[in-house]
Image (tube, rainbow, N blue to C red):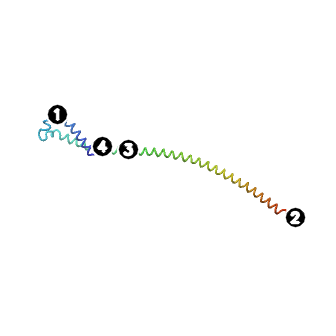
Amino acid sequence: LEEIQAKSFLEKMVFITEPMRTDAYTWREGTVLAAQPSFAPTLLQRMDQVSWQGRLSMVNQHIDETKQIMSDNIEMILENQESLEEMNERSKTLEEMSKTFKKNAQSVKRFKMWQNAKHGLVLGTAATGLAALVVVPPLIALL
């Protein structure tokens, strides 16, 4: 801030004193305070202006920093939104896959149940038939 104020002040000094510097002798080697009577009020006014502009430049710098932060935040929000949309698509795909998996699992479960039931029926029938072959002839012989 001080450097900006100093540069601004020097630029204004050069601009303001240019008309007075047309006569180099009076300006450089005149009386001790040759330019003071006409220049002092202007100098004070310009110094106040430099001080005000310094504060203004600080505010402008703060505004620029805030704008940059807001810009970065907006970019991050947009990136996050894209990421959320991607995740949403993935979740929908996974949900569809899970429904398909559940259907297939139920189908396999039913198939296995029927297969087990058939095997049970075949084994039960075979066991009953075998038991009948073993038990029935002695019973018939007893009668």
The C terminus appears in which quarter of the rendering? bottom right
Q: Which mark is residue 68?
A: 3
Q: Nearer the viewer, mark 3 or mark 2?
A: 2
What whole-number distance in Å separates the C-alpha atoms at marks 3 and 2? 107 Å
The residue identified by callout 2 is: 141
Q: Nearer the viewer, mark 2 or mark 4?
A: 2
Label placed on residue 71: none
* Secondary structure found at label 2: helix
Along the line of sight, the residue nearer the viewer: 32 or 37: 32
The disc, 2 or 4, on the residue closer to the chain's N-terminal end is: 4
Q: CA distance from mark 3 to mark 4?
A: 16 Å
Image location of residue 39, percent across then percent down: 17, 39
> Amino acid type of disc 1?
Thr
Place of residue 98 in the rendered image (x, y in percent of width and height, measured from the top left):
59, 49
Pick the quarter of the image with the N terminus: top left
Amino acid carrying label 4: it is Ser
**Residue that numbered label 4 is attached to:** 57
How many residues crowd mark 2 within 10 Å: few (<14), some (14–19), many (20+)? few
Mark 4 element type: helix
Residue found at x 46% / y 44% = 79
